[in-house]
Image: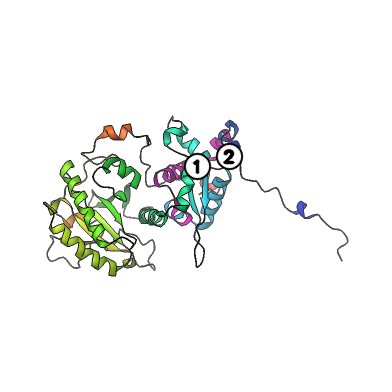
Amino acid sequence: MITTTTRQHTLRGHLPGRHTARAASSVEHQAMLASRLTARDKWLLALLHEHRVLTSLQIQDAAFPSGRSTRQRLLDLHRWRAVSRFQPFRQLGSAPMHYVLGPAGATVLAAEHGLEVKDLGYRHDRAMSIAHNQRLAHTVGVNDFFTSLIARTRHSRAGDALAVWWSESRCARHFGDLVIPDGYGRWRTHSDAAVREVEWFLEFDTGTESLTKVGRKLAGYARLAESTGIATPVLVWLPTTRREAGAHSALARVHAGLDDPRSVPVATSAADLLDPGTPHPSPAEAIWLPLTSARPGRAGPRYSLADLADAWPGLAPPASPSGEAPEGEAGDAAAASPYRLPPPSPIPPRATPNRVARGEH
């Protein structure tokens, strides 16, 4: 029989609360973060600034070995106000938590580059406004495309890697007077002791736009190719193969009417071509169907991301170093932009042994 009672509050330790906005911007809080934030944490802050919003599942694909370690670290970052989060409403089930750059994280990111927070163009209310933006699903879908490639990179034994990932905002600053891609990427492969790269602009279709509007974008890419002298492939990602079949026909008609169709290589693919039963399914697989192909006798009509360049034999390899603007783009416009940070590496920094021992990775 229990003869003594114990007050409930003595059975548990103190649970750390979340810092207030004022405390998060204090010198003391920044000093605390200096001893807590890892290189991977700072990389994640830069990624959130570049791409606006990432789900917990996307962050796990990009940087963590398990869901448990992802949740633990994101909880710490949220308490420190390095990141902020929200959970969109769903009719059925629950959506994953969505993360954006927090005020303390923006301060750290700016300080790392010798800037003021205002130089980043960052405002916390603006960062959180993506929660109610009508393009949230589109932005998350684009980021899912690229984070699945990062996951493929992290688990690839062949050394294949996503070398560059630009956001729609960065693309708009470089190409916006002609066309605004949903993203820009570059995939690197190693074969026969040689390194190959293929670059592309992404057009991400959620199934809500008319196929005619999707086709009209090719004229903008044709003008971009004419102004830069560079033929950059355009990859169109669609939700279903049924939608892809209609888009492929519509795009082929518009493509054939361009003054120089070879200046705009186009390939399509669909999300339901991925096998969810395979480990780390990604758009790197052999699921891309070019509008035109010049490799007769090839077994199968679809190409992997690494082999796409073979579909267009005259396509020149990327000339600029990874992470810089594609050749032919004016650097003055980028330098004058308030968005002054370089694009973050798509691949997180490697864990250091002592952090692994502490269980941080």
Q: Nearer the viewer, residue 260 or 293?
A: 260
In the displayed structure, does residue 354 sit left or right of residue 204?
A: right
Q: Residue at x 17, y 49 (%)?
A: 222
Q: Is 66 left, or right, of 151 in this rendering? A: right
Place of residue 361 in the rendered image (x, y in percent of width and height, measured from the top left):
50, 49
* Most common secondary structure along the magenta stretch: helix
Front-most of residues 143 and 60: 143
Residue 226 picture location, percent across and down? 15, 44
Q: Is residue 94 above or below residue 99?
A: below
Q: Residue at the spot x=57%, y=38% of the render?
A: 24
Residue 286 sits in which quadrant? bottom left
Q: Quadrant location of the N terminus? A: bottom right
Dots 2, 1 in contact, CB < 8 A: yes
Label 2 is placed on what type of residue? Ala
Q: Residue furthest top?
A: 114
- Mark 2 neighbour class, 10 Å CA radius: few under 14, some 14 to 19, many 20 or more: few
| Category of crowding for the residue at label 1, using alpha-carbon neighbours closer than 10 angstroms: few (below 14), some (14–19), many (at least 20) | some
- The region drawn magenta spans 31-58
Q: N-terminal of the two: label 2 or label 1?
A: 2
Identify residue for label 1. 124
Q: Secondary structure at mark 1?
A: helix
Report the coloring of the rendering: rainbow
Is residue 263 something one can see in this rendering? yes
User: Is 351 contained in the magenta span?
Assistant: no
Does residue 305 show up? no
Percent x, y of residue 65: 47, 55
164 displayed left or right of 111 = left
SS of the residue under disc 2: helix
Determine which of the numbered discs, if any, sits on residue 303 in the image.
Answer: none
Is residue 48 one of those drawn in magenta? Answer: yes
Give above or below for 25 relative to 2: above
Q: Which residue is mark 2?
A: 21
